[in-house]
Image (spheres, rainbow, N blue to C red):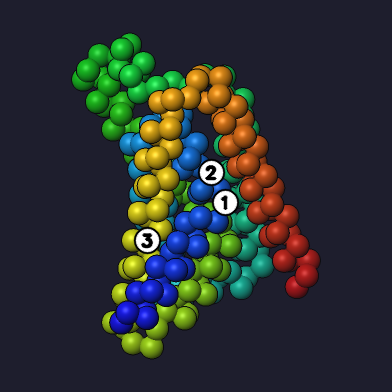
Amino acid sequence: MIDVVFKALTIGLLLAIIPGAAFFSIIHTSLSKGFRRAFFLAAGIASSDIFLIACCYLGIAKLLAIPFFNILMGIIGGIILILYGVFTFLKKEINSEAKIEEITPRIEQKIMTSNKNILYFFKGFLFNVTNPFVWILWLGITSNSGDTPRNQLFFLVFILATVFSADCLKGYFASKIKKIMSQKFLLIVNKIAGISLGVCGMVMIVRTLMELYCK
């Protein structure tokens, strides 16, 4: 059991530190919107991981063997990342939570905050679920998750818990660093994040088309 947990923690930490769309999105969201929004984004990503694992066990991930489905997922996911990257890059102001509270009545603020949290949750879910390479990644992980149902359960739970905890920590520390950053510096980070997300989207589309071409 110790070997299973150690292996799961190792894989989970590697998944958490690999620079990608989710990595940049969590950091950017925490810097620009605060830890709460980054937490819901991370929760959405974690929920999509659970959904993908369930799909892998049900055999739905075999749809990735169908070229049209693979292309569709890759292109849609890439376009979403590119559009979000462009929007992030062109954004000219970072609004803080305190500033929003100053100009919004308390009751209306609670409703708006709740809706925004849900929006970021689904944004995180959508980022992951439209990336065919994440599907392939979880297909590979689940197929080598252990020799018994108990080991498989522990293995996957520890991976998910490790990734989610690491994502929350990234968001938390980014929100703390934000307090000592100037608005100008945050805007520079915004542009870097926008470019990074756009590049991730283009790479996703290119990789999808290249895999099709190589086949």
Disc 3 residue type (three-letter): Thr
Quarter of the picture containing the C terminus is bottom right
- State the image coordinates of residue 180 (x, y, percent, origin top left): 44, 25
Q: Which residue is mark 3?
A: 162
Between marks 1 and 3, how big is the CA–CA gap?
Answer: 17 Å
Secondary structure, mark 3, is helix
Image quadrant of residue 5? bottom left
Disc 2 residue type (three-letter): Phe
Between marks 3 and 2, how big is the CA–CA gap?
Answer: 18 Å
Residue under the point 40% across and 83% down: 146
Q: Is residue 149 left or right of residue 128?
A: left
Disc 1 residue type (three-letter): Gly
Number of the label disc, if any, that sits on residue 198: none
First-in-chain label (3 vs 2): 2
Q: Which residue is mark 2?
A: 24
The relative height of residue 176 versus residue 169 in the rendered view (above or below) is above
Residue 206 in view:
yes
Residue 46 in view:
no
